[in-house]
Image (cartoon, grey):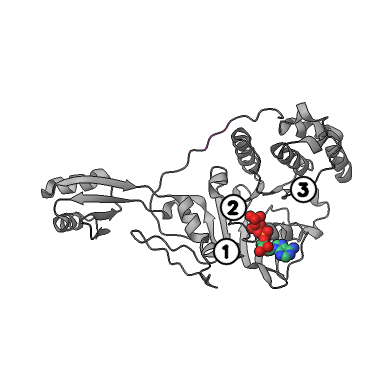
């Protein structure tokens, strides 16, 4: 039997399709009680990893387990893990209600659960229409309802925001967060950080089949350091004054401006005023998580060689971070720690999800 922990563990997972290495020595864990984003650009190996986790593809080497067991050894897996993968087909002439009834019977849950799930995902008004006429967003909802039929402990969703309107995305975010708060496990894949940023607490970033970062999203945010570009009358005098004031991450630029990290506009202004250095302008460059994500994964696009063992080459600005954190630690190890710097938190919100389209 499985251990009931709700933990997903991916350990040294590799999948080779002929000459194509879809996934290469991937390791990470997903703990219950949080929503984990599984992020990477198109072709990074996300779907292949999820398919290995769900017993649909056999790994070349390594292991992917849920509750300490491979999917195929879970007993009644629909009661343990619900999943929504890309391009899931529905019988086009079968109504959503009948589709769910067939699944309910197959996994041994009562028909009453079908109506509950239709209501939960907002499909009740469209429940008796053939699924073949559904929009992409409605099909996503039907897939989610199917995944939830067995009241699973673990939910695995591949690109769940695809086709959902903003209201649907907001509902999904609220739903996944409350699902996780019940001590359940949620893993959602996406190729766009911005699409899932508001719904996830943890993040696994992969590129070219390898782990680039895994740990709390908040820590990744904190690693993005903003800087202030100052236009002073006398750059040397400002640099000296800032350093004397204990603000040491200061870099004069060739254009006469000074880049300052680890200090606010107000602090810099105060130091400059006290030192009698005139300041003609200050520009605060906000940290951009999406940009960091892109930089961490972009070598796949640019054709640059991807290091086999990505080091931790994160350099603070002004040079852009070249991207890449060390590969994920073994399952159970503490999350990786990118450099610290406070960064404003996101603003999670929640709205309702209207009925079917
Ligand atoms: N059955 C297969 N046969 C051969 N190559 C495959 C197969 N499945 C996936 N691949 C290749 O493996 C790599 C990873 O694909 P995968 O679909 O896992 O990526 P992904 O991160 O899910 O991408 P996307 O965001 O586009 O869904 C790609 O190069 C893909 O072409």
Q: Give the structural element (helix, strand or loop) at label 3.
A: loop
**Looking at the image, can residue 193 be seen?**
yes
Query: Which mark, by number, is residue 191?
Result: 2
Local packing at callout 1 (Cα closer than 10 Å; few below 14, some 14-19, many 20+) is many
Horizontal and vertical percent position of residue 46: 65, 58
Query: Which mark, by number, is residue 193?
Result: none
Q: Is mark 3 within 8 Å of ligand 1?
A: no
**In front of the other: label 3 or label 1?**
3
Residue at horizontal 41 percent and vertical 44 percent from the top: 344
**Which quadrant of the view contains residue 245?**
bottom left
SS majority, magenta = loop
Q: Give the structural element (helix, strand or loop) at label 2.
A: loop
Give left or right: position of 210 versus 85: left
**In front of the other: label 1 or label 2?**
2
Distance from label 1 to label 2 (Cα)? 14 Å
Residue at horizontal 78 percent and vertical 35 percent from the top: 133
Quarter the C terminus occupies: top right
Local packing at callout 3 (Cα closer than 10 Å; few below 14, some 14-19, many 20+) is few
Residue at horizontal 42 percent and vertical 52 percent from the top: 222
Mark 1, residue position: 211
Q: Give the structural element (helix, strand or loop) at label 1.
A: strand
Q: Is mark 2 within 8 Å of ligand 1?
A: yes
Query: Which mark, by number, is residue 88?
Result: 3
* Range of residues picked out in magenta: 347-351
Local packing at callout 2 (Cα closer than 10 Å; few below 14, some 14-19, many 20+) is many
């Amino acid at each position: 039997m499985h251990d009931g922990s709700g933990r997903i563990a991916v350990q040294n997972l590799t999948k080779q399709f002929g000459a194509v290495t879809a996934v290469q020595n991937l390791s990470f864990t997903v703990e219950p009680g949080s929503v984990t984003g599984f992020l990477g650009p198109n072709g990074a190996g996300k779907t292949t990893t999820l398919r290995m986790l769900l017993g649909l593809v056999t790994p070349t080497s390594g292991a992917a387990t849920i509750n300490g067991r491979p999917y195929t050894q879970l007993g009644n897996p629909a009661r343990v893990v619900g999943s929504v993968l890309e391009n899931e087909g529905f019988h086009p002439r079968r109504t959503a209600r009948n589709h769910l009834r067939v699944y309910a019977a197959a996994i041994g849950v009562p028909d009453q659960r079908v109506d509950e799930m239709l209501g939960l995902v907002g499909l009740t008004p469209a429940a008796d229409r053939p699924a073949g006429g559904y929009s992409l967003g409605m099909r996503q909802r039907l897939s989610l309802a199917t995944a939830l039929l067995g009241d699973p402990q673990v939910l695995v969703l591949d690109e769940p925001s695809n086709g959902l309107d903003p209201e649907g995305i907001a509902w999904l975010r609220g739903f996944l967060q409350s699902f996780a708060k019940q001590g359940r496990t949620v893993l959602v894949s996406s190729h766009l950080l911005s699409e899932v940023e508001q719904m996830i607490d943890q993040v696994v970033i992969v590129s070219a089949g390898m782990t680039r970062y895994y740990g709390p999203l908040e820590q990744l945010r904190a690693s993005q350091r903003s800087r202030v570009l100052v236009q002073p009358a006398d750059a040397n005098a400002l640099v000296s004054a800032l350093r004397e004031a204990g603000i040491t991450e200061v870099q004069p630029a060739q254009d006469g401006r000074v880049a300052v990290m680890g200090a606010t506009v107000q602090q810099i202004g105060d130091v400059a005023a006290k030192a009698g250095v005139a300041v003609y302008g200050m520009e605060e460059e906000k940290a951009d998580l999406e940009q960091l994500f892109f930089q961490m994964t972009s070598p796949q696009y640019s054709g640059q060689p991807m290091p086999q063992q990505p080091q931790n080459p994160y350099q603070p600005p002004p040079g852009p971070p070249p991207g890449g954190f060390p590969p994920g630690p073994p399952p159970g190890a503490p999350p990786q720690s990118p450099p610290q710097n406070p960064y404003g938190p996101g603003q999670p919100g929640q709205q309702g999800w209207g009925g079917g389209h």
